[in-house]
Image (spheres, grey):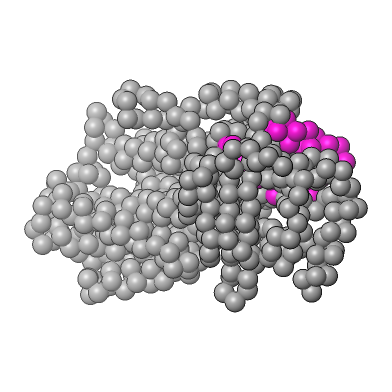
Amino acid sequence: MTEPATPILSLRGIGKSYGPVVAVREVDLDIHAGEVVAICGDNGAGKSSLIKVISGAEEPSSGTISMRGKPVAFASPHDALSHGVATIYQDLALAPRLSIYQNVFMGSELTRPVLLPFLRVLDKAKMIAESQRFLAQLSVAITDMTRPVERLSGGQRQAVAISRALRWNAEIIIMDEPTAALGVKETALVLDLIRKLKADGHTVLLISHNMRDVVALADRVVIMGAGRKFVDRPIDGLTADDLSHMIMSGNARAA
Amino acid sequence: MREVIGRYGTAIAGLAIIVFFVLFAPNFALPNNMLNVLKETSFLAILALGFTLAFTVAELDLSIAEVASLAAVVAGWLIQSQMHPGLAVAGGLAVGAAFGAANGYGVTVLRIPSLIMTLGTAAIAKGLAFMLTQGVAFMGRWPVGFTGLARGTVFGIPNLILWMAAVTLFAYGLVKWTRTGAHMVATGEADEAARLAGIATGRMKRIGMLLTGLCAGITAVLLAASLSSAAPNMAGDYLLYAIAAVLLGMTMFEPGKPNIPGTVFAALVLKVLGNGLVMMGAPYYVQDIVLGAIIIGSVAFSASAMKTAAFKV
């Protein structure tokens, strides 16, 4: 198989321990631009800890991260975001009582100068217009950007969270169990959102328990167990059942 | 209609209370009395605005009243020692800001819950105030340069009311118009989401609590200037009133959320209620009972307003 150019994101020997508990051991992983890579594994396999390291929420205990061949260090979520790595967490991503545009622009609000060049105030009108544009890009029809997020459906909330990633111009979007809490119709909506992201050239890291979602979306699958990566291969023709078997056999091996 | 009642119901009730006293409380409607009520409101409003900012970043500050007493005592002590009024003002504000900063540090760096941290600093402030004064109030003929801060007027408008307007505008502008304000709101609404969105939530909490302390300092300086005296327990009664103002304020304009206009209007309503009851000859203890009922009633109202909001999709 011919390797494309330098991976957009590359992990070498990443480990993460919490005191005596080792959550991630020696993980090497290369992600190429435009790929959708699924990370699977049972509870406690180390997926979430690995994601926290990539998203800057936690610092790795060992190993290095590089982007396009250049070493980077993510000491905070802000560092990762400014390198174009945005993470959408299952249920921690949004402030339910704040409006759509406030959530989209949370942490990176737009401002405009008033009276003096250094005196800047929030540019609500522009944030509303931009939020509308992001949601339209994702083909989500919501008109009122001042609506609190708690009044949206689960799928619409995911769209708001993805809009925030778009707002950061994120190249790599990490999605943690994006369909876990959703019904059938809402799940279909979110799967479409992910397809749109891929079509627009984004790289997506998908953490999922739902093997059907994985088969439907991913180009490549990485399976973890007991903190290690033990499968990393193209999805080519694998079925959901194949993946489940791989996860279980990996568990058996780890045990 | 439901939306209107949720948003403005208690504000309209507050307005009704004011109108009631204007019509029925003897002497309440005299211009002098109403002006006094407004002036009295300024102390409470500024202190409660501080508490609102702490609440905006989802922290409590139970030290505001004791810190205000200590700040007043420090300002009074500096005046009494023939220091320049400007220095006395700076001293009072510095005490407030220092306690606010300490509270913020304790909550974010030492990870002490704000309830505990601020109870602790409240006790410390109280002790220091009694230490400085030995339990006796500072008072005397203080320079107009100091007392004028609270007693003077600009174009006929009492300074106290102008200070209240200035602090209100500052707090409102900060929360509504600035990025820092937006980050404070996000931190208070969803701490973890804000952190993951790249917001320095610890810093936001420290800013909120620092400003809370600073507001206590401003209140203290104005109180001392207005009374020409500083006693170690002079602001003690204000804590419950400030909390009541913030909670009652949370029932109006932006139900369920601490908000600046709500706090200021609620402070006015509370002061009108206190004054009106006195004018109608109600015994002093009625105020406390009413205050307690307002605190409990406000929270109950906010909770039910939020419930209906959540169900109404």
In the image, residue A203 above or below residue B155: below
Position of residue A99 in the picture relative to residue B78 (left or right): right
Q: Please state, as top left, top right, bottom left or bottom right, where the C terminus of chain B lies in the image.
A: top right
Position of residue A183 in the picture relative to residue B154 (left or right): right
Q: Residue A6, position in %: x, y?
A: 57, 41
Viewer-side residue, A107 vs B216: A107
Report the residue that reaches farthest toward the bottom: A20
Is residue B115 within the magenta segment? Answer: no
Residue B132 falls in which quadrant of the image? bottom left
Report the residue that reaches farthest toward the front: A1
Q: Residue B312, position in %: x, y?
A: 77, 38
Q: Residue A225, position in %: x, y?
A: 74, 64
| Magenta-highlighted residues | A170-198
Viewer-side residue, A223 vs A106: A223
Q: Residue B33, position in %: x, y?
A: 37, 41
The residue shown at (53%, 23%) is A125
Position of residue A249 in the picture relative to residue A162 (left or right): right
In the image, residue B293 above or below residue B157: below
Query: Looking at the image, can residue A213 be seen?
Result: no
The residue shown at (42%, 53%) is B203
In the image, residue B264 above or below residue B203: above
Query: Looking at the image, can residue A61 be seen?
Result: yes
Viewer-side residue, B231 vs B53: B53
